[in-house]
Image (spheres, rainbow, N blue to C red):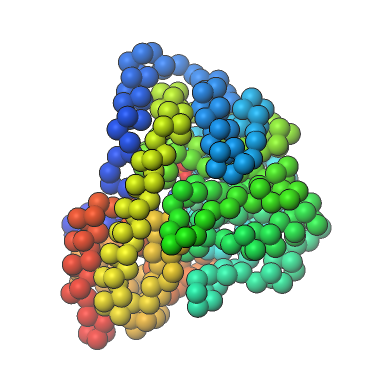
Amino acid sequence: MTALAQRISAVNLGQGFPDTDGPSRMLAVARNAVDEGLNQYPPMNGLPQLRRAVTAQRLERYATAYDPDSEVLVTVGATEAIAASLIALCEPGDEVLYFEPAYDSYLPGVAMAGGVPVPIRLRPDGGGFAFDLDELTHAVSGRTRLLLLNSPHNPTGKVFTREELEAIARVCREHDIIVISDEVYEYLTYDGATHTTIATLPGMRNRTLAVSSAGKTFSVTGWKVGWVCGPADLVAAVRTAKQFLTFAASAPFQAAVAVGLREELGWVETWRTELRDRRDQLRGGLEQIGAAVLPCQGTYFLQIDTRSLGYADGQRFCQELAQRCGVVAIPSRAFFEDVEAGLPYVRFAFCKRSDVVAEATRRLSSFNAKEL
Ligand code: PMP
């Protein structure tokens, strides 16, 4: 879809990264770190100041204490944290529960670890997306080892409620399941929805690897600085896998993210409210053409159900939208193993400059569903 967007000079709301930079002071710290010679391998665990900043943030925001030396590992983005966690903890034949639709690195990660992915479907339930607790319970077997959780959730924009997380936690405790909790959108929630990390629920801290990343929080997706927090034994296992994947993540960017976590959360709050406004702007444009827009309480993605516009296949809709209006979105089927289930949905990213979102909205208004 990006190649198509470039070919026809479309407004690209397909790719999930911002077109503006993060906090300028944080960018300056990265530049200075290079100038000051922070250009060789950092410690495998990550720079101590970043590990301390992460533990301070987890304590402040979630009242969960981690030891910066043994319970935090800095990774090359959340992607490496997830891959290394899977490689470390999933043995061949182990089953890994995950919610579908899912971020696209999960299934290849499970495959690389030799695991067997077991999907739990998130289904539209009127007010958003929900899972069926019976389906989750029945999906557990003697081989279930891990559960991959993502909240706030890409691509649905769902923020799992505390009650939902409590139900998931109960299943995990009962069946001795370890949770990899992907929280990269931890700050990007709207309309009063709050992100709860499952690690804070009773009995969960010591069976949860909480994964996050600077990419979404500070609009520096290209820096690929992520981290994982958890009990020392699990983090030691992840570190062992990470040692032979990348050994260490980029030193100057780690130094900058440490400052970002300590000093730039005010910037993040402004970014969050800007995103909320862009979401509303895009939602308005989509509703104007008659699209059924699914609720979005978090992340920077909006999904529509293209059946409301007379389509059965989101891919066809995306192609026609690009050709007719010059706006590119992506078919959500890319996030489904069960392609049929994902067929009608399309995802728009609203993390673009407000003039870009406004231009997309303007172009959308020329889309006339009745022509179909
Ligand atoms: N998890 C989810 C749910 C994501 O949406 C993304 C980025 N699109 C990632 C992980 C990857 O994060 P990073 O760039 O830090 O590797």
Outermost residue, top direction? 37
Q: Residue at (26%, 82%) from the top-left corner?
A: 369
- Image quadrant occupied by the C terminus: bottom left
Left or right of 289? Residue 222 is right
Q: Which image quarter: residue 290?
A: bottom left
Left or right of 35? Residue 73 is right
Nearer to me, 348 or 51 = 51
Q: Residue at (45%, 16%) from the top-left corner?
A: 40
**x and y, in percent, of residue 284 in the image:** 29, 70
Residue 290 drawn above or below residue 325: below
Nearer to me, 238 or 312 = 238
Residue 111 drawn above or below residue 128: above
Q: Residue at (32%, 15%) from the top-left corner?
A: 35
Is there any visible trace of residue 344 in the rendered image? yes
Q: Which image quarter: residue 307?
A: bottom left
**x and y, in percent, of residue 106 in the image:** 56, 52
Is there any visible trace of residue 239 in the rendered image? no
Residue 158 drawn above or below residue 199: below
Q: Residue at (35%, 58%) from the top-left corner?
A: 276
Left or right of 367? Residue 14 is right
Nearer to me, 215 or 160 = 160
